[in-house]
Amino acid sequence: MNPWIGWALAALFVALAWQQYGWQGVLFAFTVVVFWLLLQFSRTLRVMRGTAQRPVGHVDSAVMLHAKLKPGLTMLQVVALTRSLGRRLGEGDDDWAWTDDGGSTVRLHFVNGKLAGFELDRPAP
């Protein structure tokens, strides 16, 4: 979800709660928004904890990863799929790569935090 939409919905929720229930409604709405943010933070920490013991840029099977990818995934979703942080390619663009033991490599290109393109490079037999 676009962060602007999320924050607009949260502000609308707080405004409606204030209109209906006064300061108790605002307190309740604020509690719900903070709880939602804590859930998102917890999800991110769980993914990062899972990647802590894995080598950077390594995946069990590059072909299987390539089959699971689809445009629009966020980096957090890709890291959850690979259970490893990617190896950055170059300095300018937002390009990342994961390699398996057989030498196959999946290259991913992100635009505005979303997966825009990906390709699989397999070594010659």
Image (tube, rainbow, N blue to C red):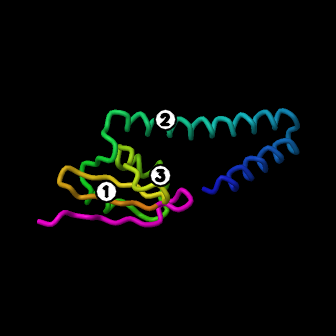
Image position of 98 with respect to 38: above or below: below
| Span colored in magenta | 110-125
- For marks 3 and 2, the one nearer the N-term is 2
What label does residue 65 carry, if any? 1
The furthest residue to the front? 91
Q: Nearer the viewer, residue 23 or 3?
A: 3
* Residue that numbered label 3 is attached to: 75
Among the 4 quarters of the image, the one containing residue 104? bottom left
User: On the rendered structure, is 105 left or right of 3?
Assistant: left
* Residue that numbered label 2 is attached to: 45
Q: Quadrant of the C terminus?
A: bottom left
**SS type, badge 3:** helix
Where residue 47 appears, as percent x and y from the top left, is 43, 40
The residue depicted at 75 percent of the width and 36 percent of the height is: 30
User: On the rendered structure, is 3 left or right of 23?
Assistant: left
Where residue 9 appears, as percent x and y from the top left, is 73, 52
**SS type, badge 1:** helix
Please name the predominant secondary structure of the magenta segment in the image.
strand
User: On the rendered structure, is 18 left or right of 88?
Assistant: right
**How far separated are the C-alphas under marks 1 and 2?**
22 Å
Which numbered disc, 3 or 2, marks the residue closer to the eye?
Answer: 3
Amino acid marked by disc 1: Leu
The residue depicted at 69 percent of the width and 40 percent of the height is: 33
